[in-house]
Amino acid sequence: MKLAALVFPGFELLDLYGPLEMFGMLREEATISVVAEQTGAVPSTQGPKAFADSSFDSGGSYDLLLVPGGLGTRREVDNQALTGWLRQAAEQAKLVTTVCTGASLLARTGLLDGRKATTNKAAFRWVETQGPAVKWQAKARWVEDGKYFTSAGVSAGMDMALAAIARLFDLEKARAIARYAEYRWSEDSGDDPFAEVHGLV
Amino acid sequence: MKLAALVFPGFELLDLYGPLEMFGMLREEATISVVAEQTGAVPSTQGPKAFADSSFDSGGSYDLLLVPGGLGTRREVDNQALTGWLRQAAEQAKLVTTVCTGASLLARTGLLDGRKATTNKAAFRWVETQGPAVKWQAKARWVEDGKYFTSAGVSAGMDMALAAIARLFDLEKARAIARYAEYRWSEDSGDDPFAEVHGLV
């Protein structure tokens, strides 16, 4: 299985690396590529840089996609090189996952239209405007609709990634990975206290 | 405040980036350097590479240190360039934090001798051998002893980082960061179900 994780300047660190920790434990089953518009170092919102080893021009196809959010999404929603790559990669993939405001990028491809999805709770109203035909769910830790798994903000990506692993393999494998990471997996996708914290419900 | 995050080949992704997400929200108060033996791309246990912008020779001094674990620690405990850098950096720092098996590297500097500390629960017995004079605590999400904050495995680093922020600033700031990250912070350092899961208690 080939996984591509998208990065862009201003991605959110934990949106990317929380899920990659979980997916990365599929050592025998998955290899991870970090993909950006250009290869090389790509700064996060927090400062530390990811290293992208593939670019939009590399031409690979992937089974599994991971799209993080972060402040950079405000700019990247208008980057047609990014949304163009994302659209074709998502059409080919078996499973497409977004974390936090990463949903805004996928929404701009049109592929979420008519589907249920969720996103960061503090930035919910902005993300809604990026996909008016998406059925945005305010109270959800993550949402599964067909091959699209979208999660709430930042740390919710870890819960979502484990749910994706449960879908791709089985529940016991996801639980074993959570145990190894000493992570308390919230297995209930509806268990989301942050919708209320941020005044959405 | 200057924070240095140590990386080495085979570091664990979430050990590094979970705490850096939390510390990285101190945007006005902290700048983050990623430090390795040599600058450039450094592969994680999971595959994706960190980008180190400083090296052991760069000569900076730091207020706050973050030492992740990962499979690479098994080799790096014998890397005297690493433990030498870590010892002098830790002596100068106001606060020194380790995640998971990162405690083995700090233990090898001798600075934890006589102090309470914790580490990954699956690798607990190995880490103990790296610091026979350390008072290792089996059941702890994280342990604070003076300026040393050591955490249990992988995701425990996020709880520990928030505790370090509470110490450096105040509890409300740590809680606000957890809310922004939609993270359920376990504020009780003794709340550790994984010691039992891994047969340590």
Image: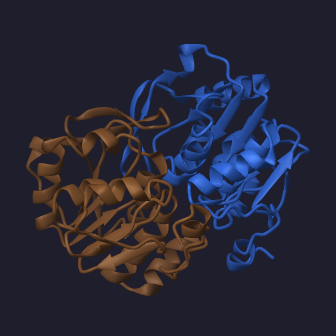
Chain colours: A blue, B brown
Q: Is residue A9 visible?
A: yes
Q: Quadrant of residue B28?
A: bottom left
Q: Residue at x 30, y 70 (%)?
A: B29
Q: How many marks?
A: 0
**Residue A104 horizontal side relative to residue B142, left or right:** right
Q: Residue at x 56, y 21 (%)?
A: A56
Q: Quadrant of residue B160?
A: bottom left
Q: Residue at x 19, y 38 (%)?
A: B37
Q: Quadrant of residue B185?
A: bottom right
Frontmost residue, A117 versus B122: B122
Q: Position of residue B181 (x, y in %)?
A: 56, 65
Q: Position of residue B187 (x, y in %)?
A: 52, 81
**Residue B128 horizontal side relative to residue B181, left or right:** left
Q: Quadrant of the C terminus of chain A?
A: bottom right
Q: Position of residue B147 (x, y in %)?
A: 24, 76
Q: Is residue A117 visible?
A: no
Q: Quadrant of the N terminus of chain A?
A: top right
**Residue B47 horizontal side relative to residue A166, left or right:** left
Q: Position of residue A133 (x, y in %)?
A: 87, 47
Toward the bottom, the furthest residue is B171
**Residue A119 horizontal side relative to residue A201, left or right:** left
Frontmost residue, A105 versus B155: B155
